[in-house]
Image (tube, grey):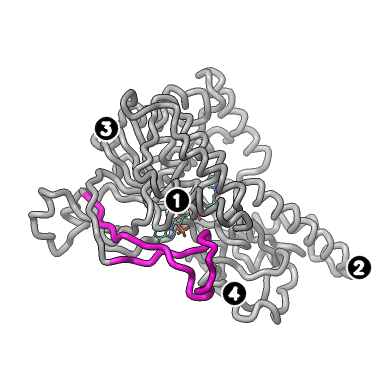
Amino acid sequence: MPSDPNGAVSVPNTHPSALAATVPLDALREHYDAVLLTYGASLDRPLGIPGEDTLLNVLSARTFVNWYNGHPYHSSLLAPLLDLSKLEHATIIGQGNVALDVARILLKDVDALREYDVPEPVLAELARSRIRRVDIVGRRGPLQLAATTKELREMLNLPGVAFDPSDRALLDQAAQDVAAHPKMDGARAKKRALGLLQGGSKATLADSRRSWSLEFLKSPVELLPTADELATAPTPLEGVVAPRNIGAVRYVQNELVPPSSAASTTDPSGFVARATSSETVSPTSVVFKSVGYRSIGLPGLPFDEKRGLIPNESGRVLETSTDPRGSATIPGLYTSGWLARGPTGVIATTMFDAFATADVIAADLAALPDGKEKRNSAGDEFLIERWRGGKRVVSWEDWERIDRVERERGKEMGKLREKITSVEEMLDVVS
Ligand code: NAP
């Protein structure tokens, strides 16, 4: 957790840069009547299985998503991690929208991406890709699919990419379950999604070079090196001096059972996975872990470790996470978005959170007794001078300039924008 040289607590930065200045939270609170914590969820949940941290070509979906979006930290990071020209089969663990995003980028014709804002180095690497097959693996069944209809439809409509319904009977069974329980949570959306999957893709397996599948009721229990490397005994410093490549995933087969809290329920949509004694091993050449994100707490502030969020009531940060209902709020401190609610929901959900929290802040500010406001026009300058540590401060106008330059560069190349993917170059643009 980063802290300033005086030991004060600051907002966590998982990609610390030597170019960044750190302003402690206490200093902000001293000068502002409202401080809003909305730094999202920057960690990914681990699988917690052998091989996850030691084998090559095992990475988080977050790393991959950041790379293809031109995140400055990940732009230089992926090149040594992954060589798409050597990989044919990808496995994605988890069946949410992030998993579908990763699959779509891996499978879509690279020429169809050129007009958008995908950075040129990313397009070049995708053009070298030999990925032909992507399996998206879920621990539960089609009824519990986390991905949404719009994203599934987009995948099914990808030109030249076939959907392989690996177990059609499971899809049919799930459709029957929805029909039998019309009042289940999200029944209409589930019915639509299942109908789409039953209908299949426009492209067929026979005439497509690329394909994808949804595999259900499988939990990974071990990531294994390639068969050749499996024959070699691991070195004492495995993963550090002699890293081996992922070659296969060992899965346990699951069955679905009611959660223990609702053992008598017959609605299968909330059923949970229970491991059976049956196992399978599936070869693969790269694994993307896509089982959700996680926020980071701040020392000195309450954090709900179980749910991975800052406890709050309508955005007002609570003093304790252990008994949220009886807890008082911390004056002047607010939270919103994934940090406040957990890493779920689409962009619109997060926008509505932001509007609601802004209303709460505005109401609290309006209720402040006259003369009690901390905010004064000297605050910004004082904070910047006190904490900049000789670093270049980027203003709103600077950001607008970077945005303009990116759009201009994109226009010259016939695309939406060409992103600047290094902080140094961004600073060059505004200096
Ligand atoms: P998500 O929707 O929560 O999906 C996580 C997936 O990982 C689920 O299939 C979950 O299965 C599985 N999972 C969790 N723990 C697991 C474990 N230990 N072993 C195996 N599988 C496990 O998360 P996400 O895909 O990261 O997306 C986060 C949020 O961003 C979502 O609300 C999503 O809709 C949103 N998003 C939206 C878009 C879009 O609108 N286009 C794009 C990207 C993301 P269980 O259900 O069994 O837990």
The nearer-to-camera label among 4 and 2 is 4
Q: Secondary structure at mark 1?
A: helix
- The residues bearing labels 4 and 2 have C-alpha atoms spaced at a distance of 30 Å
- The residues bearing labels 1 and 2 have C-alpha atoms spaced at a distance of 64 Å
Above-or-below relation of 144 to 394: below
Callouts 1 and 2 close, C-beta under 8 Å: no
Callouts 3 and 1 close, C-beta under 8 Å: no
Identify residue type, mark 2: Asp
Name which quarter of the figure residue 402 lies in.
top right
The numbered mark, 1 or 2, whose residue comes first in the sequence reads: 1
Q: Secondary structure at mark 4?
A: loop
Residue identified by numbered label 4:
302
Q: Secondary structure at mark 3?
A: helix
- The residues bearing labels 4 and 3 have C-alpha atoms spaced at a distance of 46 Å
Identify residue type, mark 3: Ser
**Which residue corresponds to the image point at 63% horizontal and 70% vertical from the top-left?**
311
**Mark 4 closeness class: few <14, some 14–19, many ≥20 residues within 10 Å:** some
Residue identified by numbered label 3:
85
Q: Which mark is residue 173?
A: 1
Q: Is residue 54 visible?
A: no
Q: Which mark is residue 370?
A: 2
The quarter of the picture where the C terminus appears is top right
The nearer-to-camera label among 1 and 2 is 1
**Mark 3 closeness class: few <14, some 14–19, many ≥20 residues within 10 Å:** few
The nearer-to-camera label among 3 and 1 is 1
The numbered mark, 4 or 3, whose residue comes first in the sequence reads: 3
Q: Check residue 254 for magenta coloring.
A: yes
The residue stretch that appears in magenta:
248-276
